[in-house]
Image (cartoon, helix red, strand yellow):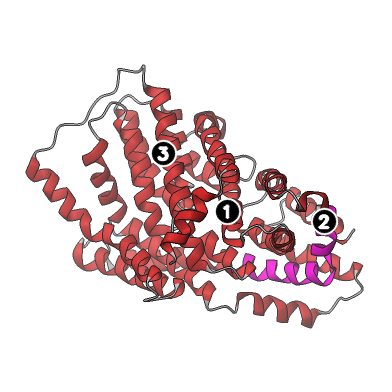
Amino acid sequence: MSLAIFLGLLLLLIAIGVPIGFALIVASIGLMFYLDAFGTQLIAQTFIRGADSFALLAVPFFILAGELMNAGGISKRIVNFAMIFFGRVKGGLGYVAIFASVLFAGLSGSAVADAAALGAILIPMMAQSGYSKERSAGIIASGSIIAPVIPPSIPMIIFGVSSGVSITQLFMGGIVPGILLAFSLAITWWLLIRKNTDFELPEKKSFMEILKVTFDSLLALLLPVFILVGLRFGVFTPTEAGAMAAFYALFLGMFVYRELSIKDLYKVLVSAAKSTAAVMFLVAAAMVSAWLITIANVPVAFANLLEPLVNNPMLLLFAIILLVLLLGCVMDITPLILILTPVLMPVVKMAGIDPVYFGIIFILTGCIGLLTPPVGTVLTVTSSVAKMKLESVLKGIWPFLVAELIVIIVLILFPDIVMVPLGWLTK
């Protein structure tokens, strides 16, 4: 009953246009009245404690790093590097978009940043070369959700803080699923364009031009390597990795590529501060909800509800994935993680499902909601960048969406695809 009251009030508030952060607080207050436990001091203390986490400091650092990469010319160099490999292949710009998405994912950790940066560069380029604008927008949007799966991932940081699961292990576990997503998109793109011969190929680059582009991109491409190696061998924590990424992006943009001025830096800092404030407010508000949900014994009630499935972990996972897909249509991934994690984790542990494996599947499924209306933030950003209607972008997305759902199903049916490489990477 407590969960029904909380979710009912929350969804009603979201439906009438209340921002999710405020909707979470109001829904929490409603639950407090129902439990006869209302106290403004409790709300304030839990709200502040929700954002008071060293691990969460990684979020503003990676957001800032993503903003600095866009403003400092790093995104452009990543696209130029990807063009070396796939630029002159039939339908090559689609493969460039996928490869660039993987590279950019290892830098930003944000699907929205990926979609905005790569969409602004590649969608006009693809349109000029004779590609369908719908498919171009579709591959950019679909490729951008690789960013929350491949480390460093902001949703994984938030999940790790909410669940107590190792963020480093989540980062390591996301590598193989992220690569599988990229392969699924590449296969789908090949199937879509194999009969099309009208693409305009870019000019062939000389060997010296290829060397110049590679050398120009090398420093930017070293960042994800530094992060993964540093995390794997315990050189730094995810929070320290975020600080290093931000400093490295600042150094490249201002002193190496020299595309980031002091004036631009001010705009970048303001933009990063706004994005950080929105995320941290959501985190703090959701922590109030999570505390109340625990007090109301909702996880126990939910566990009892799913008890028939506890003895069949695979069936339980499919049931949870269906729930996440449905809620993902009306909720962004951050509040989705913050609201569902405290409810689902006790059930997952009862079923004997590895929490790291569950976290990766959960985040991957939650990312699908970024591409679906009515909330779909990546869908909205891509539509804005491409200057297209949402319906047109969605039409271009759906074949890739099917491919990504197939990847999720495969990972549930064959968990060793995630767990075996995770064991190797974390030994």
Is tag 2's residue or tag 3's residue first in the polypeptide sequence? 2
Secondary structure mainly formed by the magenta segment? helix
* Residue stretch in magenta: 280-305
3 vs 1, front mark: 3
Q: Is residue 351 left or right of residue 188?
A: right
Quadrant in the picture for residue 10? bottom right
Residue 356 located within the stretch drawn in magenta:
no
Residue ID at (29%, 59%): 72
Is tag 3's residue or tag 1's residue first in the polypeptide sequence? 3
Q: Position of residue 5 (x, y in %)?
A: 86, 58
Q: Position of residue 71 (x, y in %)?
A: 33, 58
Kind of residue at badge 2: Leu
Q: Is residue 34 visible?
A: yes
Determine whether the residue tagged by mark 2 lies in a helix, strand or loop.
Answer: helix
Q: Is residue 152 visible?
A: no
Kind of residue at badge 1: Ile
Is tag 1's residue or tag 2's residue first in the polypeptide sequence? 2
Circles 1 and 2, Cβ within 8 Å, touching? The answer is no
Q: In the rendered view, tell whether residue 143 sits above or below residue 91.
A: below
2 vs 3, front mark: 3
Q: Which mark is residue 183?
A: 3
**Real-space Cα separation, disc 3 to disc 1, in angstroms:** 19 Å
Which quadrant of the rendered structure holds the C terminus? bottom left
Q: Position of residue 364 (x, y in %)?
A: 55, 49
**Badge 3: how crowded within 10 Å, few (<14), some, or many (20+)?**
some
Residue for badge 2: 9
